Every structure is written in structure tokens, then in C-alpha cells.
Image (tube, rainbow, N blue to C red):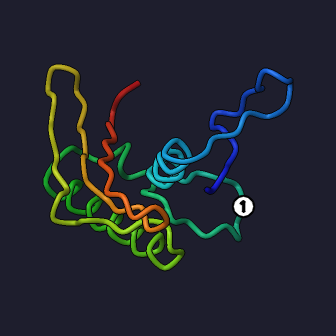
Amino acid sequence: MPTGLAVPMKANKAGGIARVTGDENDTKIIRIALTDGDNDNAFQQDFTLGQSMIFDLNDATLRARITMRVIRIFERFEKQNRFKLFADTMKWTENSKEQTLELEFRYLNLESDEPKTFAHTFGAS
């Protein structure tokens, strides 16, 4: 089972770096891929959503661009034998009171062969 470092970084009970495994690690990997990808490394390839998801107007065009970017991110995950996206399950929910936009979708964990549901909220503080 893949193991990774907890994000945000924190100490475990023994004073070492906390690690995550299983579903928690999968969720971490997907959440990192859905960040803005801002970094100072000129050679770092950007496989994230980018800053437009933060600063663009909330309209159908933004949702379409994010949807296509998520599909490309999951194509990369599939080549790495991690996850396969069920693109037809992508669903957007807008909460005008909270001024948030939520994207929910299902994917298949290719290692465990288990389908999972993932939700990400944009605009939450």
C-alpha cells in the first residue's frame, strides 16, 4: 500500500514526520493535483489546475476549463497506474450563500480496484 508524507507536514506521536497511507494518501495526492501549482522552480512541470481556478470569474467557461484540466490530470494518474477517472460522474454544485463551487466525481483506485468518490470545494477559506 502506498505511503506518503502527511500534508500539511506535522509530527507524529514519536516526534518523526507523520505519514499517511491508503485512502488518506490517495485523497492527499488528488488534492495536491487540484492546487494552483504555484512554485519558483522554472523546471517544475505543472500538472495542477493553475491559478485561473482562483482568480477567474465563476462561469461555465471556468468550469469547463477545470473539468478538462482534471481529465488531463487523471490521464496522467492512469499512466502511473494510480487512478482512473469516471468523467461522466463529474458534477458541479454552486453555493451562492457561501460563495463556493464544489466539484464531485468518482474514480477507480487502480491498485485496490475500488471505486471512490471525491469532492473538492473551490473558494472555501
**Image-based side of 18 in relation to 60, left or right:** right
Question: In front: 35, or 78?
Answer: 78
**Image-based side of 76 in relation to 116, left or right:** right
| Quadrant where the N terminus is found in the figure | bottom right
Question: In front: 2, or 63?
Answer: 2
**Image-based side of 88 in relation to 28, left or right:** left
Residue reaching furthest to the right: 15
- Where is residue 62, by image quadrant? bottom left
Residue located at (85% from left, 24% from top): 14
How many marks overall? 1
Residue located at (55% from left, 65% from top): 46
Residue located at (28% from left, 68% from top): 68
Could you say where residue 51 lies in the image, as x and y percent from the top left? 44, 51
| Quadrant where the C terminus is found in the figure | top left
- Where is residue 99, by image quadrant? top left
Q: What element carries label 1?
A: loop
Amino acid carrying mark 1 in the image: Asn
Residue reaching furthest to the bottom: 79
Task: In the rendered view, tell whether residue 3 sits above or below residue 95.
Answer: below
Question: In front: 8, or 65?
Answer: 8
Residue located at (32% from left, 68% from top): 71
Q: Residues within 10 Å of mark 1 (few under 14, many from 20)?
A: few
Could you say where residue 23 lies in the image, as x and y percent from the top left? 48, 46
Task: In the rendered view, tell whether residue 117 sits above or below residue 123.
Answer: below
Question: In front: 114, or 47?
Answer: 114
Could you say where residue 120 lies in the image, as x and y percent from the top left? 34, 41
Could you say where residue 43 lies in the image, as x and y percent from the top left? 71, 71
Identify the residue under disc 1: 41
